[in-house]
Amino acid sequence: MTDHHFTYGYYVFASAVLATYDTDFRNKFSGMVDELIRDYANPSKTDPKYPYFRNFDPYEGHSWAGGYADNDSGNNQEAAGESLFGWVGQYMWSTLTGNTAFRDASIMGFTTELRAVQQYWFNYDQDNWLPGYTHKTVGQIYGSSNFFGTFFNGNPVYIYGIHWLPTAEYLTSYGFDTAKAAGLYSGFVADNGGPEPDWYHIVWPIQALSDPQAVLNKWNPALPQQNELFNTYWFVHNMATLGSRTKDIWAENGYSATVYKKGSAYRALVWNPTNAAITVTFRNSGGATGSAVVEAKKLVKVDPTKVTTDTLLIPPALAADTTQNAAGQPIELMFTDNAAWRNAINAVKVDGTTAAATDYTVAAGAITLNPVLFPTAKTYTVTVTADKYSDTSVQQVITGSTTPTGNLALNKAVTASENPKQPAAAAVDGNPGTRWESDFSDPQWIQVDLGSAQTVGRVLLDWEGAYAKAYTIETSADGTNWTTVYMTTTGDGAADDISFTPVNARYVKVNGTQRGTQYGYSLWELEVYGSGGAVTPTAPPALTADTTQNTAGQPIELTFTDNAAWRNAITAVKVDGVTAAAANYTVAAGTITLNTELFPSAKTYTITVTAEGYNDAFVQQVITGGTTPTVNLALNKAVTASENLKQPAAGAVDGDLGTRWESAFSDPQWIQVDLGSAQTVSRVLLNWEGAYAKAYTIETSADGTNWTTAYTSTAGDGDIDDISFTPVSSRYVKVNGTQRGTQYGYSLWELSVY
């Protein structure tokens, strides 16, 4: 039984992801994947080949990874996270293949084992361990004992971390109660005697369950295991953006949906692995809160408090042209090829102006734009629009046509401090196999003469192993009077690519004040860029629009991953091209708040933020009508229905999900609500009991006599129908059932009108 569910769970998870998009793989290997699941989590008691739930112990509520063979304390399990992940893989495979037995087993297994992990491994409720046990986790659970350790190492980072891997969204289930998740991390720090010394890619996501900003504040991409860096970055930034997991709202009718809350805003991630679009309904304790249509094989983010009828797909990211980006040159934008998106492109805009179709060409992985679209040296915003996709944009810098773009220090005169171990000229010869190395003491320096005054805005230092922990970069026009343009005391070697406010200089000096090793300072290459004034601006953080309090008359709060340098460099905020007065906006860590007077009416505004030394950042901000009703207009209003009803019509408009209207057992039948006065109506929500309408219409009327059909369906399937249509002025709304979906009548828990 040893570790079958750990090892095979990884294979099953990966197979489910691959088979979702690769039919050939699924056809060839589905039998083998089924075999793996039957081995470790078989729900069948009659399988002639494999036992019933080899690893899972129903009595204990969790799995075992090892037996009696190697100890006297009974069965044991160490890696709780890997055990949970085995259920995740099984569930994903079951939803793809339609195997309901695998599906039900994985749901039971994950939910039961999650509770066991929270209590037996983490003691979330503080009533499972003896008072003398002061740690916040158990390394290993045995049938007759607990152990603070692992099979491979006794350091706290591994004892805690073994239950925090692999990094994936299932780990957010540890964080429904952020205080308990925070206790895990603080317990680790206490046991360790300080922050994590290793396994950053595992520890940081767990800390992010309760305090993602603390992780971002100490983020250093050089520290995590490099093949897991992307995953760590993804998890931490998602927690910072989405907030924490919540049970306030849940989803029905789909395959996988998780709901997050940040402040007062809710967001849901919904996954649809099938070949057809699905409609997911969101609920809270009071009833339906919203719904979303999710296209086939897509993972989307939606607001679960709203009706999302046309979820836009995510386009690939565009990469600007940085090689032949001078005025007069064609510009080639790159992207990871996506044929569906590429074929759906319907427009390319440059600074908001739609380009003629003859001025660009689209090919696999590239969009080439004619030089006529970029007449002068400046930063342009290029936006690509595609049917059923969100717009995607990129900042394209165009340099002056005569601007040098090469390394200004290449083969120029260079001097350095005394007694070098390797010559200074080797740092500017363009040969990555030669280097300058200083004497083994502090301070040391190297200086390059560019030959003439240049506008300098960037220095690239390619360190050999002997790097500078503390150093400055200084510039001078005459070689005598120096200005410091950059300073650091936390250098970590490798490559330092440093941009600063452009300055006019002939001389550039790197002045090392503290070595990072016992050796000297050693550079493979010292490169200088930026002559001619065309210094490439730095990319700003992405802005996120306000989608929670975005009605006319409300202040708007844009959010971004905090970047103090960019925030402090902000010089202007523009709304639809008009510069806002400084009194009309405030900038704080991670937020920009804009006053209500900047958004006088309901429409979509373009907000642009300008910061010195950075490309402009922009976002589309939707402002909705400030007087739009957000309550159920039918609640407790007068209601009538067809004859011989089984349950009263008032039960459908009383706001009580325990009462209902039920019609006679024949066709047609109807129910009609009087809103009391004329209202602008655009949405009807029907919460069907089991007896639903297969075919029905929704009709509106101003006088109760003359009716207009607003919606027709002949393929109703019950549950929740959340229907939006073109707004109409109406006092009366009628649901007219023409074909029942069962042998009974028509039955509605609630008829809501908005």
Image (cartoon, rainbow, N blue to C red):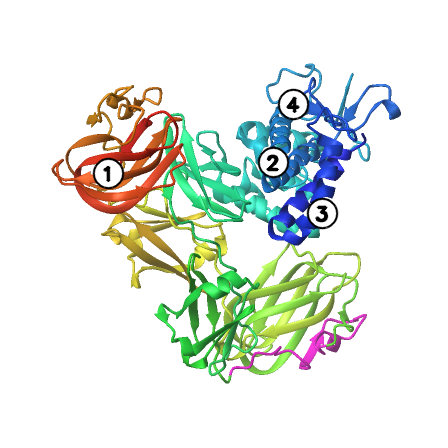
Separation (CA) of disc 1 from disc 4:
45 Å
Is 540 in front, or is 99? Answer: 99
The numbered mark, 1 or 3, whose residue comes first in the sequence reads 3
Q: Which residues are magenta?
A: 403-430
Determine which of the numbered discs, if any, sits on residue 116 in the image.
4
- Packing grade of label 4 (10 A; few <14, some 14-19, many >=20) is some
Is 201 in front, or is 288? Answer: 288
Q: Amino acid at mark 3?
A: Phe
Q: Amino acid at mark 4?
A: Ala
Q: Which residue is mark 2?
A: 171
Q: Considering the numbered disc 1 on the image, is that residue within a helix, a strand or a loop?
A: loop
Determine which of the numbered discs, if any, sits on residue 102 in the image.
none
Separation (CA) of disc 1 from disc 3:
53 Å
Q: Considering the numbered disc 4 on the image, is that residue within a helix, a strand or a loop?
A: helix
The numbered mark, 3 or 4, whose residue comes first in the sequence reads 3
- Residue 421, image x and y in percent? 81, 70
The numbered mark, 4 or 2, whose residue comes first in the sequence reads 4
